[in-house]
Image (cartoon, rainbow, N blue to C red):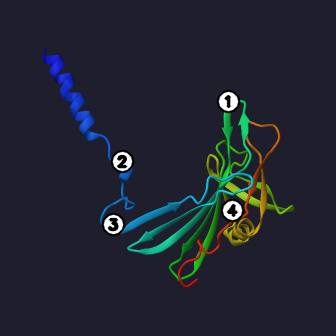
C-alpha cells in the first residue's frame, strides 16, 4: 500500500512541475535586459523564399540582426540513407564599439565537410562564379578565414536572387550543390536605427 501511495505522490509532483513552457517570455534572464526576437514571415518554397529574421537587444537597444535562409534542395549520405539533409546560411549584422556595423556569414552543414582546417568553397551568385577560403572550426560550421571578405560575401547573399554553394562533404564522392532561392531579402529589416 505504501508503494502505491508513494507512486501516486511522485506522479502528482511530476505533473505539477511540468507545463507552462509554451509561454516563456522573450527575456531569457529576467532582469538582465537581454532580449531576442525571431520572425518567420512564411513557410517557404521554391517560389516563395523562407527568410527568417531575428534580433538581439540589450536594455532595449538592438545590437545584432540576423537573416537565415535554407537551401531548396536536400541530400542524403550513406550513413543516414533515410534522412534528408539541408544546408542553411545565416547573415549577421552587429553594432561595433566604434558605432560601426560588422557583417558576417555563417554556413551550416548538417554533415562534416572536407575542410580541415580550411578549404576553398565554390559559390555561384546569379550564375556568376566566386570562390572563398573558408574554415571549419566546428563540424559542419563554415566561416570565412579572412574577415576582409565578410562584407563582400554578405552583400552577394543579400543582393542576389539565387545562390549555389558547392560543398565537399566527407561522406560523398562528389561535392553537393546546395541551391538557394534568395528572392525577397528584406534589407530594411536588417537595418539598425540611424543606419
Q: Are there few (<14), some (14-19), or many (20+) residues within 10 Å of tag 1?
A: few
Question: Gap in Å between the C-alphas at discs 1 and 2?
Answer: 31 Å
In primary-sequence order, the first of circles 4 and 1 is: 1
State the image quarter where residue 157 is shown.
Answer: bottom right
Q: Are there few (<14), some (14-19), or many (20+) residues within 10 Å of tag 4?
A: some
Residue at which label 1 appears:
82
Q: Are there few (<14), some (14-19), or many (20+) residues within 10 Å of tag 3?
A: few
Residue located 74% across and 46% down the image: 73
Q: Residue furthest left?
A: 2
Query: Is residue 47 shown left or right of residue 54?
Result: right
Residue situated in front as seen by the camera: 180 or 114: 180
- Asked which secondary structure carries label 2, the reply is helix
The answer to whether residue 149 is above or below residue 24 is below
Q: Nearer the viewer, mark 4 or mark 3?
A: 3
Q: Nearer the viewer, mark 4 or mark 1?
A: 1
Image marks 1 and 2: residues in contact by CB distance under 8 Å: no
Residue at which label 2 appears:
21
The image quadrant where one finds the C terminus is bottom right
Question: Gap in Å between the C-alphas at discs 4 and 1?
Answer: 34 Å
Question: Gap in Å between the C-alphas at discs 4 and 3?
Answer: 33 Å
Question: Gap in Å between the C-alphas at discs 3 and 1?
Answer: 43 Å
- Asked which secondary structure carries label 4, the reply is loop
Residue located 22% across and 32% down the image: 12
The answer to whether residue 157 is above or below residue 102 is above
Residue at which label 4 appears:
145
- State the count of labels: 4
Residue located 73% across and 45% down the image: 114
Residue at which label 3 appears:
32
In primary-sequence order, the first of circles 3 and 1 is: 3
In primary-sequence order, the first of circles 4 and 3 is: 3
Q: Nearer the viewer, mark 3 or mark 1?
A: 1
In primary-sequence order, the first of circles 2 and 4 is: 2
Amino acid at each position: 500500500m505504501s508503494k502505491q501511495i508513494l507512486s501516486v505522490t511522485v506522479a502528482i509532483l511530476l505533473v505539477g512541475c511540468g507545463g507552462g513552457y509554451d509561454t516563456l517570455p522573450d527575456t531569457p534572464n529576467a532582469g538582465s535586459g537581454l532580449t531576442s526576437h525571431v520572425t518567420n514571415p512564411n513557410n517557404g518554397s521554391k517560389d516563395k523564399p523562407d527568410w527568417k529574421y531575428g534580433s538581439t537587444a540589450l536594455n532595449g537597444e538592438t545590437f545584432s540582426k540576423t537573416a537565415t535562409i535554407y537551401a531548396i534542395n536536400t541530400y542524403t549520405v550513406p550513413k543516414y540513407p533515410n534522412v534528408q539533409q539541408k544546408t542553411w546560411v545565416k547573415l549577421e549584422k552587429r553594432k561595433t564599439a566604434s558605432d560601426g556595423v560588422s557583417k558576417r556569414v555563417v554556413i551550416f552543414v548538417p554533415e562534416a565537410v572536407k575542410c580541415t582546417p580550411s578549404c576553398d568553397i565554390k559559390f555561384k551568385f546569379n550564375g556568376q562564379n566566386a570562390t572563398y577560403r573558408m574554415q571549419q572550426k566546428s563540424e559542419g560550421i563554415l566561416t570565412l578565414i579572412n574577415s576582409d571578405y565578410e562584407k563582400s560575401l554578405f552583400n552577394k547573399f543579400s543582393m542576389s536572387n539565387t545562390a549555389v554553394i558547392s560543398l565537399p562533404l566527407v561522406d560523398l564522392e562528389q561535392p553537393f550543390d546546395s541551391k538557394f532561392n534568395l528572392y525577397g531579402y528584406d534589407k530594411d529589416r536588417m537595418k539598425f536605427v540611424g543606419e
